[in-house]
Image: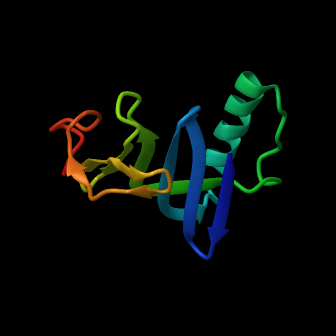
Amino acid sequence: MSAVIRGFCCTVSSPAAPDAEIMLRGTARQELDHDVQRRYAITAAACLGWQPAAGEFMLLAVDIDDVTYIGHDAETGAQHVARWPTGVEYLRPPVTPTSLGPPQPVRRLLTPATGP
């Protein structure tokens, strides 16, 4: 997993499966509240075995603005894209080994509750 923070923008990209990726985009802010850092340090110690000292590490909070899933349809080989909160979801079928056709709307991952 990789994270890039430039100014206040943050992009996190992580493999979701062998043939898929999920990208989160949002706004990062440093969490300076000592009580929040203390509670995080206690939780990290209990769950991770890491013993951080409150105030001696940078803790970030991220407001997620966009989630993008990019995967592949196993049956057709089409690229499958789903985006939240826009509610856009489509397949792009392969036209040649190196190019994709126009988007074809589908509803496989997003439901009315997760769409716009």
Quarter the N terminus occupies: top right
| 49 on left or right of 72 | right
Question: Exactly how many numbered labels are in the figure?
Answer: 0
Tell me the residue at 18%/37% (across/down).
Answer: 113
Does 83 sit above or below residue 45? below
Q: Is residue 79 left or right of residue 98?
A: left
**Vertical position of residue 65 compared to residue 35: above or below:** below
Q: Nearer the viewer, residue 5 or 16?
A: 16
Q: In the image, residue 48 lies at what x, y percent? A: 76, 27
26 and 54: which is toward the camera: 26
Q: How is the image coloured?
A: rainbow
- The residue that appears at 50% across and 51% down in the rendered structure is 23
Q: Residue furthest bottom?
A: 7
Could one spot residue 87 in this view of the protein? no
In this picture, residue 82 sits left or right of residue 50: left
User: Going by the image, does 74 lie left or right of 53?
Assistant: left
Q: Tell me the quarter of the picture where residue 42 sits.
A: top right
Question: Residue 50 at what x, y percent from top left?
Answer: 83, 32
Furthest-left residue in this view: 112
Where residue 102 appears, as percent x and y from the top left, is 27, 59
Residue 100 screen position, x and y as percent: 38, 56
Up-down: is 30 above or below 110?
Answer: below
Which residue lies at the image location 49% right of the left edge and 50% below the top edge?
97
Q: Name the residue furthest front.
A: 96
Rendered position, 95 above or below 26? above
Residue 5 can be seen in this image? yes
Give the residue displayed 60% in from the left and 44% down from the top: 14
